[in-house]
Amino acid sequence: MSTTAAVAPIAFTRGVPPIEAIPFRELAVHTQAALLEQPAAMFQYAPIARHRGDAVLRALIGQAHDADADAVFVTNGSLQALDLLAALALRVGNPEVWVEAPTYDRALSIFRRHGGWVSGVALETDGIDVEALRSRLGHGVPAFLYTIPDFQNPGGVTMSEEKRRALAELAVHYGFRIVEDTPYRELRLRGASPPTLRELAGPEHVITIGSFSKVLSPGLRVGYVVADAQTSLDLASLAEDTYLSPAPLAQAIAARSLASGLVAENVARIRALLGPRHDHAVGAVREGLGDVLLAVPDGGYFLSIRLAVAAGEEALLRAALDAGVALTKGSAFFACAQPDDEVVVRLPFQALSPQDFADGVRRLGLAIESLPRS
Ligand SMILES: Cc1ncc(COP(=O)(O)O)c(C=O)c1O
C-alpha cells in the first residue's frame, strides 16, 4: 500500500486550458448577441450543398492566413479536421502516414482508424529530423506528413525556420502533402514565430489545421482547415454525408470573438498567465531532475522529458502514482515501439500553479529514486 494514498495525486496528464484562460463573461455576451440578432440562422439547419461553415468566420480565418475564404473549412474542433482529412487522403492508394516521433496520441489513433500505416520520423530539439526524412523520401512518399510545428504536443519543440524551409523544399521536390496542426502557435511567450509551412510551400503542398480551443474555449468545439478551394469542397462533401454542418451558434460565437478583438485580448491574457508557469516549470525540472528536457518551449502547454529507466515505463507509472503524481503513458505518443528503458514523460504546465508543478516534479523524482537501477 502506498504511504501517500491519502494525498490527491498531482495530474501531469491532460492538456486542458486552465479555467482562468476562458473568457466566460465575454463569451456569454457574444452568445446572447448571436441568439438575439441571428435567431433564424442559429436555430435552423445551415445551408447544404457542400457548406463549408459560417461565411463570416471563414472570411476572418482566411484573412488571418492570407487565404481566400473558399479555401477555409470549419470543423467541430480540430480533431474532426484530422479525421476528415485522413478519410479523404487515405481512401485511395497510398496508406503511408508519416508523423513526428513522438506526436499527439489522438492523431495516431485517428490515422490508424482510417487504415493509415503510421510511422515516425525522429523529433529533434529543433523539429523533425529532416535528414532522416530526406533519406526515407528516396524510397517513396507518404500520403501526407503530419507535423505540429509550434510548441509540439508532447515534445514542446518548435521547428526552426531552417528546418521549415528544408521541409517545404522536400514537399515541393518530392510532391507530398504536409498537414501542419497549429493549436498552440499563438501561445508564444517570447521571440518571433517562424513562418508557417503553408507560407513557405504554398497551399498545393500544405494543409493548415487551426483551433479556437486554446485561444478561446475548447467547449465551443470550433476548429478549421485552411487548404485550397477543392480540398475544402471535398471536406464539405464528406461532412455533409456525416453530420451536415457544425453547430451554427458555436461558429457565430467564434466569429464575433475574432471580429471584436476578444481572441487577441484573450491570447494576451493567456500569455501573461502562462509565462510565469512556464518559467517556473522549466526551473523546477532542471533543479529536480537535471538535464532531461527535450526542449525549452517558450510557449504552448507542454514540457517533455526523456528519462533512462531500467525498470521500464509501467514500473515508472506505478511508482509515480504511489508517490502521488499521475502521468500519461509516453509510449502512446510514438507510432512504433520504443526501447523500454527510455521513457518520455509529458509534463503539461499550463494548468498547474508553480507550487503544484514543483511538488509534482519532486514526487516524480522520489518515484524515479524508488526504482531499481538495473
Ligand atoms: C496537436 C493537437 N491537435 C489537436 C488537438 C485537439 O484540439 P481541438 O480541441 O481543436 O479538437 C489538440 C488538443 O490537445 C492537440 O494538442
Image: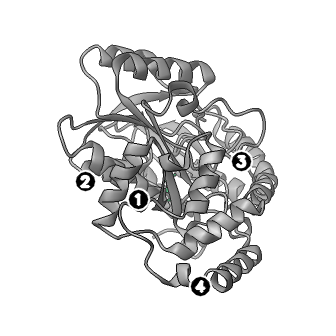
Closer mark to the observer between disc 2 and disc 4? 4
Determine the CA span between mark 3 and mark 2: 35 Å
Q: Position of residue 48 (x, y in %)?
A: 38, 68
**Mark earlier in primary sequence (3, 1):** 1
Quarter that holds the N terminus: bottom left
Determine the CA span between mark 1 and mark 2: 13 Å
Q: Helix, strand or loop at disc 2? A: helix
Give the residue at x 35% y 27%. 176
Determine the CA span between mark 4 and mark 3: 46 Å
What's the coloring here? one colour
Q: From the image, tell me which residue sits under label 4.
A: 39
Q: Are marks 2 and 4 in contact (CB under 8 Å)?
A: no
**Mark earlier in primary sequence (2, 4):** 4
The disc labelled 1 sits on which kind of residue?
Answer: Gln
Query: Local crowd at mark 3 within 10 Å, few (<14), some, or many (≥20)?
Result: many
Q: From the image, tell me which residue sits under label 2.
A: 113
**Mark earlier in primary sequence (1, 2):** 1
Query: Label 1 CB, ligand 1: below 8 Å?
Result: yes
Query: Label 4 CB, ligand 1: below 8 Å?
Result: no
Residue 209: mark: none
The disc labelled 2 sits on which kind of residue?
Answer: Arg
Instruction: From the viewer's perspective, tell me whether residue 38 is left or right of residue 114.
Output: right
Determine the CA span between mark 1 and mark 4: 26 Å
Determine the CA span between mark 3 and mark 1: 31 Å
Q: From the image, tell me which residue sits under label 1.
A: 80
Q: From the image, tell me which residue sits under label 3.
A: 281
Q: Nearer the viewer, residue 221 or 160?
A: 221
Give the residue at x 46% y 47%. 371
Q: Are marks 1 and 4 in contact (CB under 8 Å)?
A: no
Q: Position of residue 63 (x, y in %)?
A: 65, 46
**Mark earlier in primary sequence (3, 2):** 2
Closer mark to the observer between disc 4 and disc 3? 4
